[in-house]
Image (cartoon, rainbow, N blue to C red):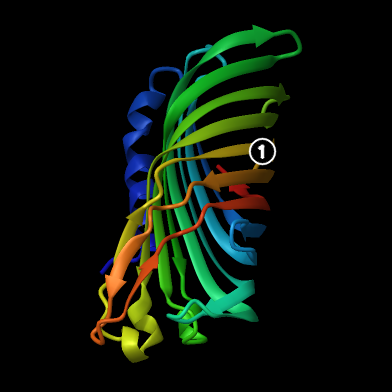
Amino acid sequence: MMSMKHKLLTILYCVAFALPARAAHGGALGFYLGTNMSRLNYREPDINISHRDSYVPGFTARVVFDQAETMAFYGYMAGKYQSGTYSYQGYSQNLAGVRTRLAMSDLPKTQSETELAFGHYVWSFPADIRLKLFGGIQYEHIDDQAYTVNRMFYGRTRDSWFGVIGMGVNKKIGDRRQVELMLKAKPVIASWHEANLSDTGGVYADMPAIRQRQPNGFRFGASVNYQDKYFWFEPYLVTTNLAATRPDKFCLAQNVCGTIHEPSNTSLEMGMNMGIYF
C-alpha cells in the first residue's frame, strides 16, 4: 500500500506539471523543496495528559503560482511529512477505572499534511507591498505508534480535513527577494480518530478498531517566509483545538464492558521550514 509520504510526493508531482499551463498567462511558477523541524506541545486538559513532540528532520515541498506583478491570480499546493518522537506524561487505566501514573519518552509518531488553496491579489500599497486573500482545504494524517515501543499503549490515528481561509502580505526586495507574512484560519470540516486497543493484547486482542468523530475544532497558523534568490526559510506557529468525541461502549469476550472516547485536546507547534527555491 502506498505510504502517506509517497502520496504527498505523487500529488505534488502532478500539480507541478499541471500548473505550467497557466504560466503562459503572465504568472510566475515557483517550486520550494526543503526540510522541516518543529516542536509540539499537546495537552488533553480534561484528564491531565500531555505530550512533547520533536520532529527533525522532516520533508516539505510546495508549488506556487503567483501573479503578483499583475495583481491577479494566486494559488499553491503544499505537502509536509514529519517523523519524530514524543514524551508522554499521563497515566494508564485498567477496566476497573484504576489509574496509574505513567511517564515515557522516545515514543514514535508521524504526521503528514497536504494543503491546496487559490485566491487573488486585492490591494497594492506603496513600497511594493501587496495583499492577497485565498481559500482552500487541508488534509492531515497523524499516526501515533507508541505501541511499537510499549504495549501499555495502543495504535491511534487521526484523519482531519480543515477549511483554509487566509491572507498574505508580501514585499518584494529587488528581483528575486521577498518577505511574506501569512495568516490562516482553519475550521474543522471533519476529523476522525481511530483507536486500536487490540495492540495492547491480552483481553483486548480480538477487539475491533473504534473510529470516532471529533465534532468540531479550529486551527490558526502564522508564518513569515523570507526568500533570497535560491534559498528560503520560514518560521511558523500553529495552534489547534479539537472537541471531544462522544463515548462509545465496547464489550470484551468475557462480557466485560466499558466506554472509550477521545478527550478534547489542544496543541501548539513551533517550527521552521527551509530549503531551495527554483
- Residue 68 appears in the figure: no
- Residue placed at 53% from the left, 15% from the top? 121
Depth check: 174 or 94 in front?
94
Depth check: 16 or 133 in front?
133
Depth check: 237 or 126 in front?
237
Q: Position of residue 151 (x, y in %)?
A: 46, 87
User: Residue 211 is drawn in which quadrant?
Assistant: bottom left
The quadrant in which the N terminus is found is bottom left
Disc 1 is placed on an element classified as: strand
Q: Position of residue 189 (x, y in %)?
A: 38, 38
Asked if residue 112 is positioned above or below residue 114 in the image, the reply reads: below
Judging by the rendered image, the residue that carries numbered circle 1 is 223
Depth check: 106 or 100 in front?
100
- Residue placed at 63% from the left, 72% from the top? 90
- 1 left or right of 97 in image: left
Asked if residue 223 is positioned above or below residue 61 in the image, the reply reads: above
